[in-house]
Image: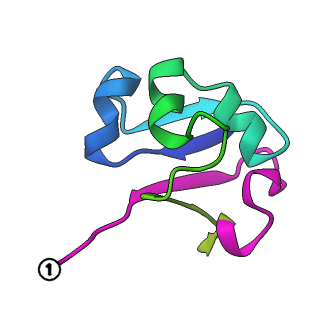
């Protein structure tokens, strides 16, 4: 199982949970196993990670790894962080 830690803004789409778990061997497979309402907030219509969403695996942004194809192993934790813009 892979744990997915959620920011407060996404918790309503996971029944209020701070953390959810899903199976998969890649980040994309883990996302595919999530509840549809939550998955829609993480990925766009083409299935890519939304621009305003950052996903970290072992302190590395998956965009710097292999994106949704990044391999995960049992016990890993993905951290979801929304982008913050300032003015």
Was residue 23 drawn as part of the magenta stretch in this picture?
A: no
Quadrant showing the C terminus = bottom left
Residue 23 in the image: above or below residue 85: above
Near-viewer residue (24 or 74): 24
**Nearer to me, 49 or 12:** 49
Q: Relative to residue 22, is residue 25 depicted above or below?
A: below
Magenta part of the protein: which range?
Answer: 63-87
Quarter where residue 4 is shown = top right
Q: Position of residue 17 (x, y in %)?
A: 36, 30
Q: Is residue 1 visible?
A: no
Residue that badge 1 annotates: 87
Residue 17 seen in the current view: yes
**Residue pictured at 76% horizontal, 71% vertical:** 65
* Relative horizontal placement of residue 6, taking residue 46 as reference (left or right): left
Q: How many marks?
A: 1
Q: Quadrant of the N terminus?
A: top right
Seen in the picture, residue 28 relative to 13 is either above or below; the reply is below
Q: Based on the displayed image, in which of its 4 quarters is residue 19 positioned? A: top left
Closer to the camera in the image, 2 or 42: 42
Report whether 53 appears left or right of 75.
Answer: left
Q: Position of residue 66 (x, y in %)?
A: 80, 64
The percent coordinates of residue 52 (x first, y second) are 42, 58
Residue 69: within the magenta?
yes
List the single residue furthest toward the left. Answer: 87
Q: Left or right? Give the position of 48 relative to 26.
A: left
Residue occupying image coordinates x 51% and y 42%: 42
């Amino acid at each position: 199982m892979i744990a997915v830690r959620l920011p407060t803004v996404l918790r309503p789409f996971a029944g209020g949970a701070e953390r959810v778990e899903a199976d998969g061997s890649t980040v994309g497979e883990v996302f595919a196993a999530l509840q549809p309402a939550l998955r829609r907030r993480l990925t766009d219509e083409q299935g890519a990670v939304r621009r305003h969403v950052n996903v970290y695996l072992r302190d590395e942004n998956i965009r710097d790894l292999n994106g949704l194809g990044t391999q995960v192993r049992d016990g890993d934790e993905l951290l979801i962080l929304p982008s913050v813009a300032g003015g």
